[in-house]
Image (cartoon, rainbow, N blue to C red):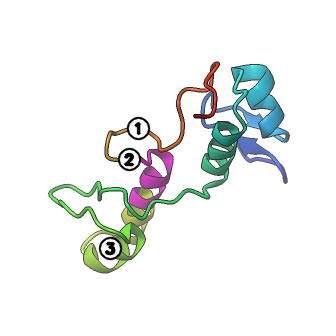
Amino acid sequence: MTLTKGMVDCPLCGRAYAALASHFIRGHHVVNLAERAILCNMATGRILIRATPCSAAGCSYHSSRLDKHITNSHQELTTALRARLMADAKQHPSGADGQLPGYRGGRGARPG
């Protein structure tokens, strides 16, 4: 589906919304402001992926610049596949524990 200007897909349910922050409050009960900001950034692609491990098959890279690594070290992959690796890293960023940094599930989570 082609989104109209200002519409963004919700990373939790996949539907398109113009007022995504309000949707998180009403639809998913995400009351924590910091978690809502993380989810809004995730929906728009503004995610810090520098410390995310490389998801290319057989690659063990886990350092500071994943974007540069995928572009420079995986030139054997097609441009489309490299773009897909970057999109996957932005959709599933994780910390050392495998969880989205700063996001604790939304429902009733309070800032700590």
Percent from the top left, x then y, of residue 86?
A: 44, 60
Question: Mark 2 — residue?
Answer: 95
Residues at marks 2 and 1, CA–CA distance in whole angstroms: 6 Å
* Residue at position x 35%, y 69% in the image: 64
**Where residue 5 appears, x then y in whole percent?**
84, 54
User: From which residue to which does the magenta span run?
Assistant: 85-94
| 13 relative position to 3: left or right | left
Of mark 2 and mark 3, the one earlier in the sequence is 3
Asked whether 81 or 104 is in front, the reply is 104
Q: Are marks 2 and 1 in contact (CB under 8 Å)?
A: yes
Q: Residues within 10 Å of mark 1 (few under 14, many from 20)?
A: few
Residue in front for this viewpoint, 105 or 77: 105
Residue holding disc 3: 69
| Image quadrant occupied by the N terminus | top right
Q: Amino acid at mark 3?
A: His
What residue is drawn where x is 69% and y is 38%?
A: 36
Of the residues under marks 3 and 1, which one precedes in the sequence? 3
Please state if 86 lies on the left or on the right of 6 as rendered.
left
Looking at the picture, tell me which residue is in the foreground, 1 or 43. Answer: 43
